[in-house]
Amino acid sequence: MKTKIITLESHDDLISVRDKLSWAKTPRILLVWPKYEKVTLRLLDLKVLQRHADSLGAQLGLVTRRMKVRRDAESLGIPVFSTTASAQKDVWAEAAPRTQRTPPPPRRDLRSVRDEIYLKESPWRTSLLGRVLTFTAGVMAVLVMAGLFIPRAAVVLNPEAQAVSIVIPVNANPATTAVSLSGEIPAQEMSIVVNDEQTVTISSRVPIPKTKATGVVQFTNLGSDELLIPAGTLVATNTLIRFMTLNDTRLPAGVDEIVEVKVEAVEMGAKGNVRAGEVSVIENALGLSAKVSNPDPMIGGSDEDVIGATEEDRITLRDKVMIALYEKARGQFQSNIGADDLLIADTLFMKEIKREEFSPSAGQAGAELVFSVEAEFTARYVLAENLKALAVSSVTASIPQGFSPSGEMTFSPLEAPITDASGITRFPLQATQATLRNIDKLQLYNLIRGRTAQSAATAVKDTLSLQNEPQVTVTPSWWPWLPLIPFNISVEVK
């Protein structure tokens, strides 16, 4: 018998195999599974293919070695072969004849069965009056629920207000570590380094040394030995105006032997011009063996009158810079602490001057004088949180019964803090707190719910102590009464 052989591929599925069956025009159709590829056809797929082959008037057979496919095919009565050759030689088992299911005749007593199963409604429910009454009750229930949950009311109250203000004596002490109700609070200490520089124009005229004074001194031997007087030997007056020898000289041996040596002033200027006999000091060990004097005045030292800073100019500029330095230090302290922290002004002082310098230095000419200084300052301050903690604890105890705080508390020193010799800073602190009379919302709800807006406002005014008339608003505006349910009533206290 003629057989159509269809070799399956790994990508074949139920649809593609079914289409391939449709093209077969032979009484037998043989599906061949590939040896090394997997074809995903389930038991249900094989059943569908078997029925499709039956509809085409053909018998379906399989060639496969896969045990699962063989079991599924045998369960459906599909013949299975090992090779295509055996499938063409062997006899195929006859397919079981297909049976056609004949539907049973329709039942004639369905209406009576329905009437037995379903209960009949009561007559009052099927009557027009019953339905109207039921509908009316439903509408009334909806209206009642709407009346309970839809209306909203807002009540604005201005209860009685009272300001509580007290004055607290404060003692700020660095040794204190915690805030006390007695007024003891910690004082914090801080140090910073501040520098400043200012320049002024100079119009004063000052003498500036120009040349050195010169002259001759006599050395007198006090012993019997010859003495060597080296160049650079220093001699001076009793006022410490110093001169230096210009060359090496030998003082002959013998008591009262004399030698003259040229000298010049160590420093330039007219102050080196001294009178005769004023030089009398030898500034080394030579003074034990000889004495010195100037038989003639020292001359030749001169000054030049130029524009320069006098000592008064320097003192004036320094005082000005120091005042500015204190102000700068105060500003830096204030910026380093919190905005509400309290700086204790009388504890601000200069701990150490690290550097100060004039330019040009003393004795030099210049049309401008520059003074720069760097100093370390220390100061104490009080934390705002400590002041607030002290104020809150003191004011809270003073709030009248039946009132509650409203808004932020304000506090500030009444007088400038003063620090005594023991290092304790004392000042009075004024703290003020606004309070409002307490409103019992449960009492308010019981007083106003279910009333009209006007009667509710009147009842609230007569019962509570208020500053202004209460404002009662109902939403929607056409609804006459306040809600009965408290959570539909909002209360705002100002």
Image (cartoon, rainbow, N blue to C red):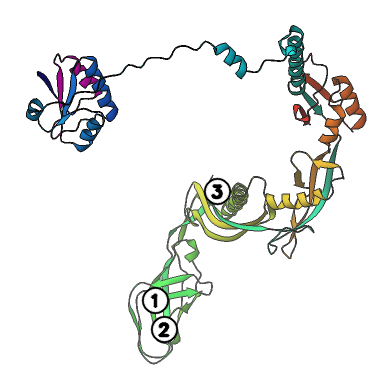
Q: Earlier in the sequence, mark 1 or mark 2?
A: 1
Q: Which residue is mark 1?
A: 233
Question: In what element is the residue under mark 2?
Answer: helix
Q: Amino acid at mark 1?
A: Thr
Q: Position of residue 94 (x, y in %)?
A: 19, 23
Q: Is residue 11 left or right of residue 213?
A: left
Residue 415 % position (x, y):
78, 49
Query: Which quadrant does the N terminus fall into?
Result: top left
Residue 432 in the image: x percent, y percent? Answer: 80, 43
The residue sitting at 83% across, 45% down in the picture is: 165
Q: Position of residue 494 (x, y in %)?
A: 79, 31
Label 1: how many Cα within 10 Å (few below 14, some 14–19, many 20+): some
Which structural element holds mark 3?
loop
Which span of residues is magenta-colored?
Answer: 13-36
Tag 3 residue: 204
How many other residues sit within 10 Å of disc 2, few (<14), some (14-19) or many (≥20)? some
Which label's residue is closer to the chain start, 3 or 1? 3
Disc 1 to disc 2, C-alpha distance: 9 Å
Q: Which residue is mark 2?
A: 286
Please give left or right for residue 269 compared with residue 338 in the image: left
In the rendered image, is residue 6 in sight?
yes
The quarter of the picture where residue 15 lies is top left
